[in-house]
Amino acid sequence: MSGDRGNSPGSCTIAELAAWWRVNRSEAPGFAERLGLRARAGRYPWIAVWRAMGIGAPAPEQIAELKAPLMTLAEVAVQRGEAVGTFRRKLREGRFPDLPHYALGPRTRRFHAAQALAWCDGDEVPQYPKALKDRKKEAAPTPPASPEPPARPTGKVDLMGRPV
């Protein structure tokens, strides 16, 4: 994945993003759009990609493992020694709460290789920083509380059918 400068994670093309997500090149623009990603001069900044997936700015030593291609559900199931269908069902049932994963679509789950492999081996799962929430949403003022609670309907209605 190109575009690297020093400790900066750089950026990637849509083809590189498709390879990272492990999806067909033709599907990648749809995933990017659903995540709200926008290309800048035909490239997607890694920081923006990770933020869209809920990951904050990583430590410099985490960049390489975050840029490694994601693992598919089938690959994690094989690594764990389970049938793909059984693993999928257990994941859907919430039986693996300590296994971080990403839903790229209703039937598309992906896993960071470092996290999935550590989890399969019973090792401590690497943690990545969480992305900060949208500051615009946090800064929105909350409406003042109404001074008195709304009147309870008595079951009575006026001639127009409005509660009284």
Image: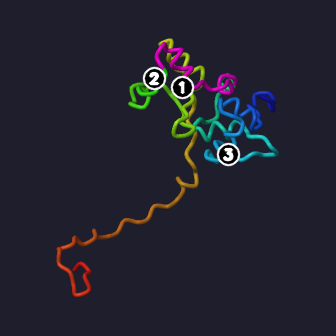
Contact? badges 2 and 1 (CB < 8 Å): yes
Residues shaded magenta? 64-83
Q: Residues within 10 Å of mark 1 (few under 14, many from 20)?
A: many
Q: Residue at x 52, y 30 (%)?
A: 101
Nearer the N terminus, badge 2 or badge 1? 1
Residue 24 falls left or right of residue 100: right
Q: Residues under labels 1 and 3: Cα distance?
A: 24 Å
Residue sitting at x 55%, y 40%: 105
Residue at the farthest bottom position:
159
List x then y, in percent, for residue 109: 54, 32
Q: Residue at x 48, y 25 (%)?
A: 99
Quarter of the image holding residue 148?
A: bottom left
User: Left or right: 150 with respect to 156?
Assistant: right
Reading the chain from its start, which is encountered first: label 2 or label 3? 3
**Label 2 belongs to which residue?**
87
**Residue beneath the point at 26% across and 81% down:** 162
Q: Earlier in the sequence, mark 1 or mark 3?
A: 3
Viewer-side label of 1, 3 = 1
> The residue under label 1 is which amino acid type?
Leu
Residue at the disc numbered 1: 73
In this picture, residue 3 sits left or right of residue 98:
right
Image quarter of residue 42:
top right
Q: Which element carries disc 1, helix, strand or loop?
A: helix
Reading the image, the residue beneath label 3 is 37
Tell me the amino acid under the disc marked 2: Phe
Q: Kindly identify the amino acid type of the residue bearing the numbered disc 3.
A: Leu
Q: Decide: few, some or many residues near mark 3? Use Cα within 10 Å; few <14, some 14-19, many ≥20.
A: some
| Mark 3 secondary-structure assignment | loop
- The alpha-carbon separation of the residues under discs 2 and 1 comes to 8 Å
Q: CA distance from mark 2 to mark 3?
A: 30 Å
